[in-house]
């Protein structure tokens, strides 16, 4: 069984060894390991992908033992496996203002085009609450009066709801690196409203328009700590416009028609296990 382990906390010596020794001592094979140590932030982060033997203890017991190690070392340790539960993967849909992407996701789940469960919708604004209410999905606002998000609350909701994948459906805030590490390994999926790597950032329509582009599009990618890094693309699609098409029409086509279809297809590739994230690159999963 494939299991991912993340450990995040204040940096000091001897943090990785007890985790590695425990899993290898239990007979696990380590397929991938990454570590992050930035002195300026005094932050330690580690991600491991392991093959957990079926003859060993259940994943829940592994989680309990590693959490005990985390308490001793001052680390938040999370253990996750897609195969731990016999159920569709649970999604947390994160939103800000635009309703079209979450609406498309919920319709695809309702129509069984996405084999997943919408466990919760999370927003730093209330703009998409009505969409959640329409589909009887719980809505949690993690933003203050001006939309500044409480990322500790976000992590708590993900943990309590036993979320498998976090979907940023035009969620217009940059996740801090610490949060990305907590749910590393292809568990955070982002819809970017531009073609990566050419047009990253918050205004890709405007940037492409200023460069006199006639081709626009959207990108769905796994999140890693680097913003819109571009090497983790799950799905990307483009549409062309005629010369002289106004920016307002380009954005209408992209936001109303193009982005919703793009995010649904990107999620589908993940929940149907067609692709995985390995060493910060998307790879096709062997059938």
Image (spheres, rainbow, N blue to C red):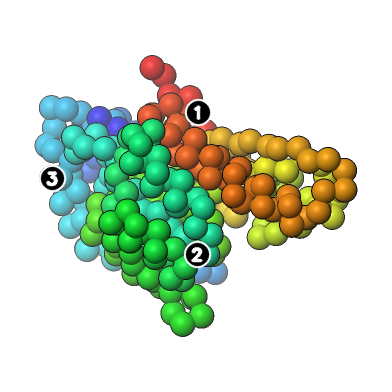
Tag 3, which secondary structure?
Answer: helix
Q: Nearer the viewer, mark 1 or mark 3?
A: 1
Quarter occupied by residue 31: top left
- Which label's residue is closer to the chain start, 2 or 3? 3
Crowding at dot 3, Cα within 10 Å, few <14 / some 14-19 / many 20+, comes out as few
Q: Would residue 64 be found to the left or right of residue 233 on screen?
A: left
Q: Give the Cα separation between the discs numbered 2 and 1.
A: 30 Å
Using the rendered image of the protein, determine whether residue 98 is visible from the camera's viewpoint.
Answer: yes
Numbered disc 2: secondary structure: loop
Q: CA distance from mark 2 to mark 3?
A: 37 Å
Q: Residue 40, position in %: x, y?
A: 54, 69
**Residue 126, quarter of the rendered image:** bottom left
Residue 55 at what x, y percent from top left?
13, 27
Label 2, residues with CA under 10 Å away: few <14, some 14-19, many ≥20: many
Is residue 12 left or right of 52 when viewed as pictured?
right
For image coordinates 49% across by 35% down, the residue present is 265
- Mark seen at residue 283: 1
Q: How far apart are the two marked residues, 1 and 3, measured between alpha carbons? A: 30 Å
Judge whether 97 appears above or below 5 on screen. below
Residue sitting at x 34%, y 34% = 112
Rendered location of residue 18, percent (x, y): 26, 50
Tell me the residue that label 3 is attached to. 61
Q: Earlier in the sequence, mark 2 or mark 1?
A: 2
154 lies above or below 218: below
**Closer to the observer: label 2 or label 3?**
2
Q: Nearer the viewer, residue 112 or 70?
A: 112
- Residue at screen point 39% across, 65% down: 129
Q: Residues within 10 Å of mark 1 (few under 14, many from 20)?
A: some
């Amino acid at each position: 069984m494939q299991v991912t382990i993340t450990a995040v906390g204040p940096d000091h010596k001897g943090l990785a060894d007890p985790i590695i020794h425990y899993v290898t001592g239990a007979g696990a094979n380590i397929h991938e390991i990454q570590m992050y140590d930035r002195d300026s932030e005094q932050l330690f982060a580690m991600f491991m992908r392991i093959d957990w033997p079926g003859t060993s203890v259940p994943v829940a017991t592994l989680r309990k033992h590693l959490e005990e190690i985390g308490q001793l070392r001052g680390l938040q340790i999370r253990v996750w496996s897609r195969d731990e539960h016999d159920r569709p993967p649970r999604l947390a849909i994160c939103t800000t203002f635009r309703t079209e992407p979450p609406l498309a996701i919920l319709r695809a789940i309702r129509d069984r085009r996405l084999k997943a469960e919408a466990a919760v919708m999370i927003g730093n604004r209330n703009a998409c609450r009505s969409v959640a209410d329409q589909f009887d999905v719980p809505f949690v606002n993690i933003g203050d009066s001006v939309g500044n998000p409480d990322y500790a609350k976000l992590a708590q909701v993900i943990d309590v709801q036993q979320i498998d994948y976090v979907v940023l459906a035009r969620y217009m805030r940059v996740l801090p690196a610490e949060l990305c590490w907590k749910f590393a390994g292809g568990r955070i999926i982002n819809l970017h409203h531009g073609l990566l790597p050419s047009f990253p950032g918050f205004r890709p329509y405007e940037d492409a328009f200023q460069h006199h582009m006639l081709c626009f599009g959207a990108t769905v990618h796994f999140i890693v700590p680097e913003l819109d890094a571009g090497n983790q693309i799950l799905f990307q699609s483009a549409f062309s416009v005629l010369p002289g098409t106004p920016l307002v029409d380009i954005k209408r086509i992209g936001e109303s028609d193009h982005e919703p279809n793009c995010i649904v297809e990107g999620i589908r590739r993940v929940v149907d296990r067609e692709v995985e994230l390995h060493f910060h690159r998307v790879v096709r999963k062997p059938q």
